Image (cartoon, rainbow, N blue to C red):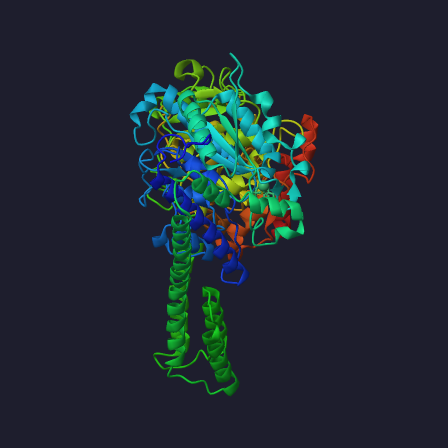
Amino acid sequence: MKQNQNQPVQNLNKESILADFRLANLSRNLSIIGRREVLTGKAKFGIFGDGKEIIQIAMAKQFKNGDWRSGYYRDQTWMMAMGLYDSLEFFHQLYGNTDNQFDTGSGGRVFNNHFSVPNINHDGSWRDLTKQKNSSADISPTAGQMPRLLGLAYASKLFRLNKELHQFTTLSLKGNEVAFGSIGDASTSEGYFWETINAAGVLQVPMAVSVYDDGYGISVPKKYQTTKGSISEILKGFETEKDKPGIRLFKGKGWDYPGLIKLYEEGISVCREQHTPCVFHIEEVTQPQGHSTSGSHERYKSEERLKWEDEFDPIKKMREWILSSDIATADELDKLANEAEEEARESRRIGWESFQDPIKIERDALVKIINDRSCRCTEKAKEDSVDSYTEDLKKVAAPIRKDNFVTARKILRNICGSCLKSDNLNQELQGWLKRNYEDARRSYDSFLYNETPTSVLNVTPVPPVYSPESPEVPGRQILRDNYEKLFSKYPLLVTFGEDTGAIGGVNQTLEGLQKIFGELRITDTGIREATILGQGLGLALRGMRPIAEIQYLDYLMYALQVLSDDLATTHYRTAGRMIAPVIISTRGHRLEGIWHSGSPMAMLINSVRGIYVCTPRDMTRAAGFYNTLLEGKDPAIVIEPLNGYRLKEKLPVNLGEYRLQLGIPEILNSGTDLTIITYGSTVKIAVEAVKQLAAHGISVELIDVQTLVPFDRNKMILESLKKTNRILFLDEDLPGGTTAYMMQEVLEKQGGWHYLDSPPKTLTAKEHRPAYTTDGDYFSKPSAEDVFDIIYGMMKEAVPQRF
Ligand SMILES: Cc1ncc(C[n+]2csc(CCOP(=O)(O)OP(=O)(O)O)c2C)c(N)n1
Ligand SMILES: [Mg+2]
């Protein structure tokens, strides 16, 4: 090997260099063929990693077992270089193959090049995360990978510094793991990037972010994205100085194979050993095929730029370097490039067949059922349409399952239902649809929630127990004393948020606990809701039990994107192969003013399906939910009633042990005239109204649903409605919000409409946010008098002779 100034670092030999060259070529061919598959209509959409091959090969060399990735859709070469992905999986993903034996990590649920590695076994138990290379599951929103990346890195810090955690040897090897991130240059314009970088600098965590700077975010060039046109330039203020820890910056060029290998070797060792966050700004990166299959880059790149990209193509440059360093001959390289191309083509062929064959088998079975029918319809028009639908289906060259289902359902409309023959087509088709719909349900409509034995819905309930001496204490003390038990019981439990640490939360629910359990377990954070949630998400993916504290429900909106796009879809988008059982603790409903009285529950439940939503009416119930959630493995939000911390509740003797089931309402008052359905802080309003109504001879059944998701799993409300035949849905969300949701659950899903003797009603807050004072609250949110009046009116209308 000829010496030159870019002489590769140790461990590089001819064999590994040529393997890298072959891999880069393979990856490039996949990108080229992948694009073609979309443009010819075989796949729906494609986004590829061409131009980023060499960076990723260099980075992968530093990625060890136990490490974590949080990246984006350009990372196919990286995943292949780590042995986590191959050319066949590339096509399974591209076509959207749902067969879980192919283990693409996404089960056909996300775009191609969105990767993940399972963190649980099929029975829900944790895998040994230290013996595999780990990747969190990618999402499409730009920079959406950043908040989670912070948490993945933060876990290493906790596993290193908290000696109690050294026993968990299948989760971490004393925090020796690096969390690698990747992001495009344009995505660094997002607030999440900056929030994450700042938090990582504060926390000093082993986070290594690579920015692939190809100069564009789709068509928009850097001058519109980045001040001074250079992300490393503007990150300089974050850089570590003497006695002022910050982040380390590294710069490389996307085509410089030996340079990049050296760069990552140096940088990642700093990151791993010293737990210093690092940013690798990789410039001069190309994008040979443009952004995605949705357009062509000739529309926005100049001739000059296109020419430069061609010249600085990283594979071309690597080839030049190999030749000029006398590592291999042109013939050897051509042979490898041809081999790579052949592998890509062959994988395409196999991938396409694997996708098409089962659909064709399904189609053939359907066609056979139709052709073999013994019942011919006497109506000619109907008989003709059955034949023509069948013929049309047979002609589809590349069928998808939809074609089969549409045909079956349309034919079903055109056959008579009265045929007496035992093998009549109607029955056969119904059977075919039932079987195949069940199969399609497993492919597309499963794993929104944990379906393994570790689901919180399987946790055995334990009621709170009281002794005659149980004192009445402020609600916040129940939470505090319960937390004390939980922190003793679960070594992997941590909580963190604004004011959570030293003072124990703005409502003192963790008062004094940092002194007992230490700063690593009960921790203050900066004001940065999105990355607080990301911190929780990353920790939970790594097997810890985080409770992420969001100070008020009103501020959860800052974290809503992470909740909705990332956490809520984690289990679903990995087809059940990853879990992230974060608990989000917050407080809301009513206190004072526009930003401390929100109860936007419909906004929440409609954007976080996939996360359970608990709405306890008091702190005893809130603590009971935390106790349950820590026994299972699902993500959940608990909204404590903000005006209840000082109100007295009886202190249970079995703190930390009693557990409330999710989806099981509680009947707080039984009655016969009307049922009130409510939750959270309006329960107290309802209790007061029920008393006032009783004094006027109206008997109300009051039901606290306790959790909005899941909702009344045993149809307890329906039983109440069968008795009272009248119902009011009450809360302090907006009109048409969660009351509409509850109404649909009860009247439509439970079939409650059948038992109604009066029109169902809702009572909610006004459409505007609550004005600041107590009067503002009274005139903005429902009061006991409002509840009284609406129910009195309903009764008067229904049975005027009584009133
Ligand atoms: C929040 C959000 N906004 C917009 C998009 C649409 N989008 C997808 S990729 C992309 C450009 C990203 O550019 P860059 O970060 O430089 O990565 P590159 O594709 O160049 O590798 C945009 C705007 C998105 N996915 N998410
Ligand atoms: Mg870019």
Tell me which corner region of the image, top left, top right, bottom left or bottom right, holds residue 764: top right
Q: Is residue 765 left or right of residue 76?
A: right
Residue 402 vs residue 115, the one in the foreground: 115
Q: Position of residue 723 (x, y in %)?
A: 48, 50
Quadrant of the rendering where the N terminus is positioned? top left
User: Which residue reaches farthest top?
Assistant: 243
Residue 301 vs residue 135, the one in the foreground: 301
On the question of residue 73 being in view, the answer is no
Q: Position of residue 277 (x, y in %)?
A: 48, 25
Q: Position of residue 172 (x, y in %)?
A: 34, 29
On the question of residue 160 being in view, the answer is yes
Q: Position of residue 348 (x, y in %)?
A: 42, 59
Residue pictured at 62% horizontal, 26% vertical: 234
Residue 85 vs residue 165, the one in the foreground: 85
Ligand 2, image quadrant it occupies? top right
How many numbered circles are shown? 0
Tell me which corner region of the image, top left, top right, bottom left or bottom right, holds residue 691: top right
Q: Is residue 791 left or right of residue 420?
A: right
Residue pictured at 47% horizontal, 48% vertical: 113
The answer to whether residue 474 is above or below residue 449 is above
